[in-house]
Image (cartoon, rainbow, N blue to C red):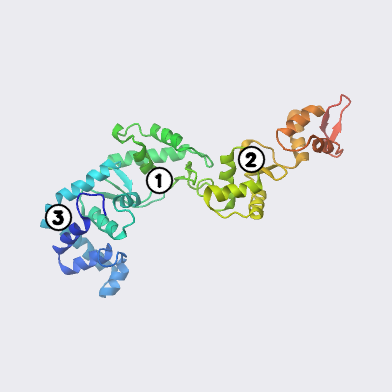
Amino acid sequence: MSSFDFKPKIIVKKLLADIPQRGREVLTSRYGLGKTFEKMTLEAIGKKYGITRERVRQIENAALANVRKSKVYKESITVFESLKKTIANLGGIISEEDFLNHSAPKDKELQNNIFFLLVVGDAFKRSKEDEDFKHRWHIGDAHAKKVEEALKKLYKSLSDDELLPESEIMERFLKHLEDVNSEYRDEEILKRWLSISKKIGKNPLGEWGVTDSKNVSVKGIRDYAYLAIRKHGSPIHFTEVAKAIEKMFSKKAHVATTHNELIKDPRFVLVGRGLYALSEWGYINGIVKDVITKILDKNGPLNKKEIVDKVMKERYVKENTILVNLQNSKNFKKEKDGKYSLVK
């Protein structure tokens, strides 16, 4: 059932009844308006009638023109006004997928009829999918351009791996929508506009970022592990990471497989026995010896307590493990004042 105060299938049937048979058959096949809701290509229709692809296009265009000139079309003005009002209420510009799913959820046949009404309606303009945006419909060129420009600016403001909660992406988006009427500053409308973009997306945790980022377009165990650890907020054992993936995303995550993926990905740092953190949290990569090396390289000679304190902020290890590593004379030497420095 559609969300309109008219029956799209009945309106379409009346519109098609008022034009020549060949044109009616082509439109019915082209837009999936018959017994089957599968849409036929120009080539397929051409083969059916033994005519060229271009000839089918000519018949289609002539048939659409005949529909727009028909008496039934003129009598259906309230239908098109209702459609126009719906698009306006949804934000004035909306992705084709969103509009059809909103108008006729899970009813492909009904969606095809609504799509046809949009095609023949003079008030509606369709912008085809491009590198920035999905197929979309709008009822005002200037308004649509403002929204699209704001989405482009928002995309440019996002770093590659940045993730924002929905409230923050909305706030940032609004800063680029200064010229858009206040009536459209509605959370649901803003989310619809965001969904027009192909370059901005949302991950399974509802966080927004650049679509190309692994943190947004989640595909494998590594990506799910990243989100799980990020959500946890502190180092976590790989066995718990596997459990978290299964609980949060309903994805099967074998413990051994999860561990192997954590080892391979530079987004993760081993900070203790089986404990992993995110490298973006500032943890130093490498084993305890490497951590001590980087600390001394950054800070210069330090005493035993200073080294232990700094290493313990980077690794969940026993103090004795750090002290044993300090005895490595190939890397570290003890100065006369009791401080340790790097062997040059």
| Residue 222 at x, y percent in the picture | 59, 50
| Residue 237 at x, y percent in the picture | 66, 44
Kindly indicate whether the residue at mark 3 contacts the one at mark 1 (C-beta within 8 angstroms).
no
Which SS class for mark 2?
helix
Q: Which residue, given by chain and number where applicable, does mark 1 sit on?
A: 197
Q: Which residue, given by chain and number where applicable, does mark 2 sit on?
A: 279
Give the amino acid type for the residue marked by disc 1 in the picture. Answer: Ser
In percent of the image, x 38 and y 41: which residue is there?
Answer: 191
Which SS class for mark 1?
loop
Give the amino acid type for the residue marked by disc 3 in the picture. Answer: Tyr
Quick one: label 1 or label 3, which is nearer the N terminus?
3
Q: Which mark is residue 144?
A: none
In percent of the image, x 28 and y 74: which residue is there?
Answer: 48
3D distance between C-alphas at marks 1 and 2: 30 Å
Give the amino acid type for the residue marked by disc 2 in the picture. Answer: Ser
Judge left or right: residue 235 versus residue 162.
Answer: right
Q: Is residue 223 visible?
A: no
Kindly indicate whether the residue at mark 2 contacts the one at mark 1 (C-beta within 8 angstroms).
no
Judge left or right: residue 76 versus residue 119.
Answer: left
Q: Residues within 10 Å of mark 2 (few under 14, many from 20)?
A: some
Q: Which residue, given by chain and number where applicable, does mark 3 sit on?
A: 73
Seen as rendered, the residue at the extreme top is: 337
Which SS class for mark 3?
helix
- Quadrant assignment, res 231: top right
In percent of the image, x 50 and y 46: which residue is there?
Answer: 216
Q: Nearer the viewer, residue 97 or 146?
A: 97
**Where does the N terminus fall, quadrant-wise?**
bottom left
